[in-house]
Image (tube, rainbow, N blue to C red):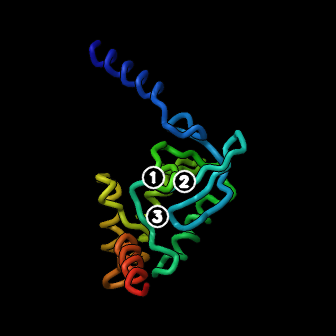
Amino acid sequence: MRLKYYALICLFLISCSDSGNPKIKSSNQKGKVVAVKDGDTIEILTSTNETVTIRLTEIDCPEKKQSFGKQAKQFTSNFCFGKFVEIIGNKKDRYGRTLAFVFDEEGNNLNEALVKNGLAWQYVVYSKSEILRKLEQEARDAKLGLWIDENPIPPWVFRKSRKNNQIKIL
């Protein structure tokens, strides 16, 4: 009985929480994918005709100028462009993008699919997911996608090195 009571209180508190994003009132939102900016960033059009930029949470795809960056973007496009998706998550990153898991109409998880196919890293700084860890290790072992390279450069290292190079040039 106490467990049921506790579960009801938790559900009530979750439903009352404010995400801080007026475009996404709850942790679940549906929308049509109207743009794929790169492998891990999409834009959806909500039922209220508002666009919301979604950054796939807990993963990081190669940048466009990195090996497999274009393939990651193409995979994401094939997975969801022009289709209706459900997003789960409502936190925002420092750029104002909504951090979320993205699911197609059949319930397939885009975040996991990118990692499984060797087109993304688990972003371990922000993720403790055992599922993503396992999927990444399986892709590494099978040398899928970016794991075919001997020493692939994680996108967070690539971005940092580009930023440092720009500072040196100035």
Badge nearest the viewer, 1 or 2: 1
Q: What's under tag 1, amino acid-wise?
A: Asp
Residue drawn where x is 45% and y is 68% of the image: 61
Neighbours of disc 3 within 10 Å: few (<14), some (14-19), many (20+): many
Q: What's under tag 2, amino acid-wise?
A: Ile
Residue positioned most to the bottom: 169
Residue drawn where x is 57% and y is 51% of the image: 104
Classify 16 as above or below 119.
above
Looking at the picture, how far across and down is residue 109, in whole percent? 49, 53
Residue drawn where x is 56% and y is 64% of the image: 76
Looking at the picture, how far across and down is residue 142, in whole percent? 35, 74
Residue under pointer 3:
114
Q: What's under tag 3, amino acid-wise?
A: Leu
Neighbours of disc 1 within 10 Å: few (<14), some (14-19), many (20+): few
Q: Nearer the viewer, residue 11 or 63?
A: 63
Badge nearest the viewer, 3 or 2: 2
Residue under pointer 2:
54
| First in residue order: circle 3 vs circle 1 | 1
Neighbours of disc 2 within 10 Å: few (<14), some (14-19), many (20+): many
Residue under pointer 1:
93
Residue drawn where x is 33% and y is 55% of the image: 126
Q: Nearer the viewer, residue 34 or 110?
A: 34
The Cα–Cα distance between marks 3 and 2, rounded to whole angstroms, is: 15 Å
Name the element at disc 2: strand
Locate the C terminus and report the quarter of the image it occupies: bottom left
Q: Are marks 3 and 2 in contact (CB under 8 Å)?
A: no
Q: Nearer the viewer, residue 133 or 169?
A: 169
| First in residue order: circle 1 vs circle 2 | 2
Classify 117 as above or below 134.
below
| First in residue order: circle 3 vs circle 2 | 2
Residue 125 falls left or right of residue 120: left
